[in-house]
Image (cartoon, helix red, strand yellow):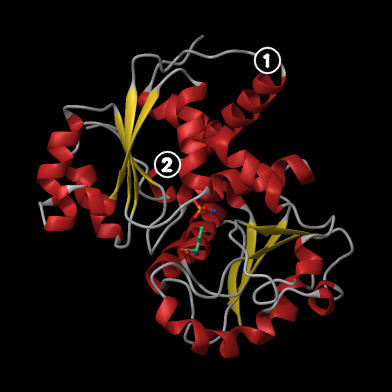
């Protein structure tokens, strides 16, 4: 059975910090002009059923940067669009490529591809999780704050795929997390319950954004309507208004608190232009780190590390 990255729960603390340590090394090596070829002769298939700028391009750049190749398949161009079973897709793709990077709707798609694939399957976002993003975001926090174990991380807004992956990261890596979500928009209850039973540090859900940011070192914000929820956009605009990350909310946070946004951002909705463009927001460093993190993930999971 190959190793799959379906959610952060699939890995131990040591394995997760291994991805981060390697990503930091690879970032430095790129700055130093080191050329890599450890994935020469290998290829991955990118199967994307939802739009993407950062994740697609950073996975492609990562694979090329390590000497490998990618084959991009948009959902509508494969026979999946005509109901070919996932178990057939998984076995066919396994004969052609060394790994699959999948962005889709249901987490069950990733689970089923992984169950039938003889090559690693990597979750590049589902409705339930965005694990690779949170790994690069944790890397960004470590770079900015010198570590994450002693940081208080806040989540403000929708209890969505990003929130669920932050919850799993908090338990696995061991840091404090406080989420402020409006009633009815909580993170996945099973994921939350599961981690709260074993987490070393508090993982709390509150309603007040002010309470969440009051002692936060890091404030996370994401869109109010995720991909696939476009029909709810109008309704959500009103419900989430008190959760906007703006100057007023930032004034309630400690002076050194930084803001993370995985992008794309909807300015003047979940975050104001002013906060997004301020020195406190590290969204573009996060975006860069996705490429270094994806290199680390591909190298570790697809193989071929140069010693
Ligand atoms: N942050 C992120 O996943 O961006 P994309 O949707 O552009 O890939
Ligand atoms: N929660 C967002 C993240 C986008 C990268 C979405 O799923 O659309």
Give the residue at mark 2: 11
At horizontal 74% and vertical 72% (from top left) the residue drawn is: 272
Crowding at dot 1, Cα within 10 Å, few <14 / some 14-19 / many 20+, comes out as: few
Is the residue 17 above or below the residue 307 in the image?
A: below
The first of marks 1 and 2 along the sequence is 2
Q: Is residue 141 left or right of residue 74?
A: right
Give the residue at mark 1: 33
At horizontal 27% and vertical 52% (from top left) the residue drawn is: 75
Q: Position of residue 92 (x, y in %)?
A: 13, 35
Q: Is residue 82 left or right of residue 154?
A: left
Identify the disc placed on residue 298: none
At horizontal 39% and vertical 50% (from top left) the residue drawn is: 7
Is the residue 81 above or below the residue 39 in the image?
A: below
Is the residue 209 above or below the residue 106 in the image?
A: below
| Numbered disc 1: secondary structure | loop
| Numbered disc 2: secondary structure | loop
Whether residue 148 is visible, yes or no, is no
Whether residue 188 is visible, yes or no, is yes
């Amino acid at each position: 059975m190959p190793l799959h990255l379906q959610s952060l729960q699939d890995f131990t603390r040591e394995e997760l910090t291994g991805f981060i340590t390697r990503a930091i090394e690879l970032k430095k090596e790129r700055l130093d002009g080191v050329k890599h070829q450890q994935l020469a002769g290998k290829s991955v298939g990118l199967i994307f059923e939802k739009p993407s700028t950062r994740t697609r391009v950073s996975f492609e750049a990562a694979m090329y940067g390590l000497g490998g190749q990618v084959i991009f398949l948009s959902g509508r161009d494969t026979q999946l669009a005509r109901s070919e079973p996932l178990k057939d897709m998984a076995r066919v793709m396994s004969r052609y490529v060394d790994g699959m990077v999948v962005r889709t709707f249901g987490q069950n798609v990733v689970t089923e591809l992984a169950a039938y694939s003889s090559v690693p399957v990597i979750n590049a976002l589902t409705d339930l999780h965005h694990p690779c993003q949170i790994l690069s975001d944790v890397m960004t926090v470590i770079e900015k704050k010198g570590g994450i174990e002693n940081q208080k991380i806040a989540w403000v807004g929708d209890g969505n795929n990003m929130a669920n992956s932050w919850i799993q990261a908090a338990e696995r890596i061991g840091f404090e997390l406080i989420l402020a979500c409006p009633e009815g928009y909580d993170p996945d209850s099973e994921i939350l319950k599961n981690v709260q039973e074993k987490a070393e540090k508090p993982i709390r859900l509150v309603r007040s954004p002010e309470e969440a940011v009051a002692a936060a070192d890091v404030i996370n914000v994401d869109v109010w309507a995720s991909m696939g929820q476009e029909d709810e956009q109008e309704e959500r605009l009103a419900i989430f208004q008190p959760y906007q990350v703006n100057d007023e909310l930032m004034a309630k946070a400690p002076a050194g608190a930084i803001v993370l946004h995985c992008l794309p951002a909807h300015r003047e909705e979940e975050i104001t232009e002013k906060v997004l463009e301020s020195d406190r927001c590290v969204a573009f460093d996060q975006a860069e780190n996705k490429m270094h993190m994806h290199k680390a993930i591909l190298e570790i999971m697809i193989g071929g590390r140069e010693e």
